Amino acid sequence: MSDTELHPHESQPEVPTHTAGDRHPSAKEYVRIALILMGLTAIEVWLSYSSLPHGLLIAMLFVAALIKFALVVLWFMHLKFDDRRYARFFLMGLAGAFTLYLIVLISFRVFAR
């Protein structure tokens, strides 16, 4: 007797299927994202040497960091091409990190300067 006949109530594991929407980026797209990340890093360096008010500077650097985080997670960690449940876990972590970072900045009175 085969294993299936011995345990008819157990189902076979599903084999993942790929659809047209599951395509992964090409090397050209990875290079393009890397160039965008380099540009954002250059903007962050420029901002750090600018004479912007301290609160505005922190806010702009934080926004740039969030954009870079999203690009890295979506493209280089392939989250854009995976199940949406994984995205929820990253968003919960991002929300937690944002909240903690904001609490630390407020407790050190960064925005009051």
Image (spheres, rainbow, N blue to C red):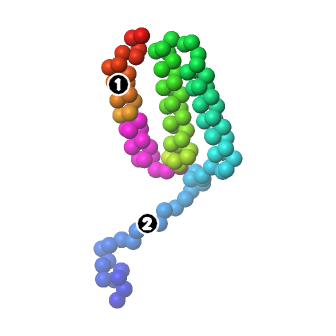
Q: Nearer the viewer, mark 1 or mark 2?
A: 1
Between 1 and 60, the one nearer to me in the picture: 60
Mark 1 neighbour class, 10 Å CA radius: few under 14, some 14 to 19, many 20 or more = few
Residue at image x 63%, y 40%?
Answer: 34
Could you tell whether 94 is left or right of 21 in the image? left
Q: Position of residue 43 (x, y in %)?
A: 61, 25
Secondary element type, mark 2: loop
Task: Provide the secondary structure element on which disc 1 rests.
Answer: helix
Closer to us: 68 or 14: 68
Does the magenta portion include 20?
no
Q: Which residue lies most toward the bottom here?
A: 1
Q: How many marks?
A: 2
What is the quadrant of the C terminus in the image? top left
What residue does disc 1 label? 104
**Quick one: label 2, few (<14), some, or many (20+) residues within 10 Å?**
few
| Residue that protrudes farthest toward the right in the picture | 28
Residue at numbered disc 2: 14
Amino acid beneath label 1: Val
As measured in the structure, the alpha-carbon distance from the residue carrying label 1 to the one carrying label 2 is 46 Å
**Quadrant where the image shows the N terminus:** bottom left
Q: Is residue 82 magenta?
A: yes
Q: Residue at x 35, y 19 (%)?
A: 108
Is label 1 in contact with label 2 (beta carbons under 8 Å)? no
Which percent across, then down, holds residue 5?
Answer: 34, 83
Residue depicted at x 54% and y 28%: 64
**Span of residues in magenta:** 80-95
Mark 2 is on which residue type?
Answer: Glu
Q: Earlier in the sequence, mark 1 or mark 2?
A: 2
